Image (cartoon, grey):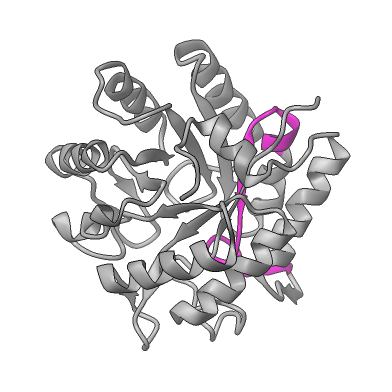
C-alpha cells in the first residue's frame, strides 16, 4: 500500500486539563508551540479548540484568530481545522469563528449520548453551520459518533449541502456512543466505500483505543487522528509527553504498513482543499 496517510493532531479539545497531563496546551502560545512540534512529526491537519485562561472551553473568535495566525506562521501549509463542537458554546456561538475562513471545520450532523450528557446537534443548527461553511468555502470534517451520522452526511453531500469533498471521521470509543470495535469499524468502512465511493475517511480512537484505531485506519487505507484531546497517555502508566509523541507513534504505524505520511500539500490535494495562503 503506497497511498499517503493524512495525520491529524487534535491538540487540546474541551476536556483534558493540565491536572490530567501538564503537556495539554491551553494558551494560544502553548497551542502554537505544541502544534509546531506535531507538524514537524508529520501532522498535516491541526484540529483546534481554544480555551480560557482557567482552562474552561471557549468559542472566542479572537482566540481562534490568534491561533490561526500562529499556526500559519510556524507551520507553513498546515491545514487548519476549527472545531464547532458543542462543548465550546451554545447555538450559533459554535460557528462564530467560521468567518475567519479556516481550511476545514468539524461538523457533527446528529445528536448522541456522551458519558454524562446529551451531545445536542439539532437539525436547524446543523443546517446553519453547514450553510456558513458553504458561504466561507470551508470543507467540513464530519465527526460521526453513530451510523446515522454517516448516512445523514452522505445525504447532505448528495443534496449539495456540504462544501467540497465529503470527508467523514469515525469517532470510536466515546462512552455511550460508537464503541472501538473492529467489526463495527469494518462495517463503517464498507458503508462509506459502498454508499459514497468518492468520499475520503478517517478514524479517531478515544483514550486507550487511540493507538488501536490508528492502526485499523492506517492498515485499511484511511487517514487517522491522534493527540492530547483524545488521549493523554502512551500507556496506562505513562503520560504522553506531547502531541508530537502521539503523532510520531501514528507515523511509525504508517511505516509498518508502508504508507508514506502525507505532507500538507498532499493532504490538501487528497481532500480537495485550496492551496495554502
- Examine the structure image and report whether residue 199 is included in the region drawn in magenta: no
Outermost residue, left side: 124
Q: Residue at x 76, y 58 (%)?
A: 248
Spot occupied by residue 222 in the image (x, y as percentages of width and height):
64, 31
Q: Residue at x 28, y 73 (%)?
A: 62
- Examine the structure image and report whether residue 226 is included in the region drawn in magenta: yes
Identify whether 121 is placed above or below 259: below
Spot occupied by residue 53 in the image (x, y as percentages of width and height):
37, 87
Spot occupied by residue 217 in the image (x, y as percentages of width and height):
67, 36
Residue 105 vs residue 100: left or right?
right
Q: Quadrant of the N terminus?
A: top right
How many numbered badges does the structure rendering display? Answer: 0
- Viewer-closest of 71 and 238: 71
Q: Residue at x 83, y 50 (%)?
A: 252
- Viewer-closest of 226 and 16: 226
- Residue bounds of the magenta highlight: 216-234
Q: Residue at x 57, y 24 (%)?
A: 189
- Viewer-closest of 134 and 175: 134
Outermost residue, front side: 277
Spot occupied by residue 50 in the image (x, y as percentages of width and height):
38, 71
- Viewer-closest of 246 and 98: 98
Amino acid at each position: 500500500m503506497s497511498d499517503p496517510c493524512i495525520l491529524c493532531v487534535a491538540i487540546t479539545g474541551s476536556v483534558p486539563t493540565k491536572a490530567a497531563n501538564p503537556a495539554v496546551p491551553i494558551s494560544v502560545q502553548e497551542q502554537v508551540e505544541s502544534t509546531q512540534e506535531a507538524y514537524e512529526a508529520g501532522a498535516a491537519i491541526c484540529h483546534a479548540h481554544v480555551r480560557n485562561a482557567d482552562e474552561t472551553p471557549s468559542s472566542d473568535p479572537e482566540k481562534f484568530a490568534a491561533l490561526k495566525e500562529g499556526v500559519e506562521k510556524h507551520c507553513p501549509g498546515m491545514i487548519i481545522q476549527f472545531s464547532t463542537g458543542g462543548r465550546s458554546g451554545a447555538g450559533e456561538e459554535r460557528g462564530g469563528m467560521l468567518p475567519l475562513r479556516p481550511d476545514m471545520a468539524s461538523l457533527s450532523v446528529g445528536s448522541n449520548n456522551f458519558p454524562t450528557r446529551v451531545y445536542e446537534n439539532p437539525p436547524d443548527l446543523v443546517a446553519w453551520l453547514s450553510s456558513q461553511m458553504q458561504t466561507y468555502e470551508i470543507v467540513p470534517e464530519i465527526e460521526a459518533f453513530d451510523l446515522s451520522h454517516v448516512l445523514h452526511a452522505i445525504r447532505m453531500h448528495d443534496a449539495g449541502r456540504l462544501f467540497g469533498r465529503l470527508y467523514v471521521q469515525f469517532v470510536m470509543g466515546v462512552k455511550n456512543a460508537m464503541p472501538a470495535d473492529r467489526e463495527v469499524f469494518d462495517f463503517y468502512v464498507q458503508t462509506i466505500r459502498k454508499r459514497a465511493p468518492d468520499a475520503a475517511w478517517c478514524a479517531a480512537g478515544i483514550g486507550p483505543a487511540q493507538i488501536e484505531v490508528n492502526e485499523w485506519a492506517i492498515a485499511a487505507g484511511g487517514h487517522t487522528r491522534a493527540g492530547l484531546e483524545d488521549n493523554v497517555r502512551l500507556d496506562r502508566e505513562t503520560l504522553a509527553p506531547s502531541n508530537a509523541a502521539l503523532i510520531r507513534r501514528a507515523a511509525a504505524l504508517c511505516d509498518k504498513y508502508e504508507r508514506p505520511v502525507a505532507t500538507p500539500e498532499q493532504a490538501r490535494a487528497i481532500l480537495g482543499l485550496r492551496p495554502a495562503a
